[in-house]
Image: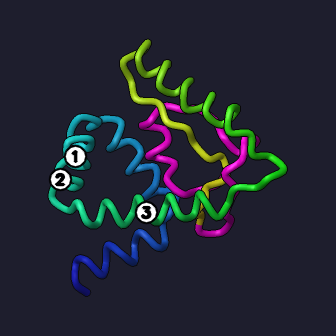
C-alpha cells in the first residue's frame, strides 16, 4: 500500500486521534501554521475567493427573519474586533452549529453565534460536537 493511501485509511479509522494530533500541532506551531495559511492564500487567491464565496452564499441562505437582528449580529463582530485590539490575539465570530457542517448545518442567527479565539475557531472547523 502506498504511503498516501495508508495515511488516508488511518485518518478515516482514527478520526478522533487525528483531530487531536492536528489540534496539538497547531497549538505548538501557531506561527508556522499561520504563515502557511497566509502563503496559501497569496499563492491561490482564486481558491481562497471561491472558498469565501461559498461560505458567504451559505451564510446568506441561512438567515432567518425570526432571529435576524442586524444590530445584535453586528455586536458580535464588534466584540470580536474589540477583544482582538485589547488582547492582541485574533477573535472570530463563530457559528456554534456550523453553516456547512458534514452532519448538520446551522443558521446565521443571533442564537447561533459566539465570539471565540481564532485558533479555537480554526481547530473547530465545520464540526459540531
Q: Which residue is mark 3?
A: 53
Q: Which mark is residue 114?
A: none
89 w.r.t. 19: above or below: above
**What's drawn in magenta, residue-wise?**
102-129
Q: Is residue 74 magenta?
A: no
Q: Are marks 2 and 1 in contact (CB under 8 Å)?
A: yes
Q: Which residue is mark 1?
A: 38
x%, y% of residue 120?
A: 48, 38
Left or right: 109, with 84 as reference point:
right
Viewer-nearest of labels 2 and 1? 2
Disc 2 is placed on an element classified as helix
Q: Outermost residue, bottom direction?
A: 1
- Residue 58 location (% of width, % of height): 57, 64
Q: Residue 42 got which mark?
A: 2
Viewer-closest of 112 and 121? 112
122 and 11: which one is in front? Answer: 122
Which element type, helix, strand or loop, lies under badge 3? Answer: helix
Q: Quadrant of residue 119?
A: top left
The CA distance from mark 3 to mark 1 is: 18 Å
Residue at image position (20%, 42%) is 35
- Residue at 66% across, 51% down: 108
First in sequence: mark 3 or mark 1?
1
Q: Tell me which residue sits at (41%, 58%) in the image.
A: 52
Q: Residue at x 25, y 77 (%)?
A: 4
Please state if 104 lies on the left or on the right of 89 as rendered: right
Amino acid at each position: 500500500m502506498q504511503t498516501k493511501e495508508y495515511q488516508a485509511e488511518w485518518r478515516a479509522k482514527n478520526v478522533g486521534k487525528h483531530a487531536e494530533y492536528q489540534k496539538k500541532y497547531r497549538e505548538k506551531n501557531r506561527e508556522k501554521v499561520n504563515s502557511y495559511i497566509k502563503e496559501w492564500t497569496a499563492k491561490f487567491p482564486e481558491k481562497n475567493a471561491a472558498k469565501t464565496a461559498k461560505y458567504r452564499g451559505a451564510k446568506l441562505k441561512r438567515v432567518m427573519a425570526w432571529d435576524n437582528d442586524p444590530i445584535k449580529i453586528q455586536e458580535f463582530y464588534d466584540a470580536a474586533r474589540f477583544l482582538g485590539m485589547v488582547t492582541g490575539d485574533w477573535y472570530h465570530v463563530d457559528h456554534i452549529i456550523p453553516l456547512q457542517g458534514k452532519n448538520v448545518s446551522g443558521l446565521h442567527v443571533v442564537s447561533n453565534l459566539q465570539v471565540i479565539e481564532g485558533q479555537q475557531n480554526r481547530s473547530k472547523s465545520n464540526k459540531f460536537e
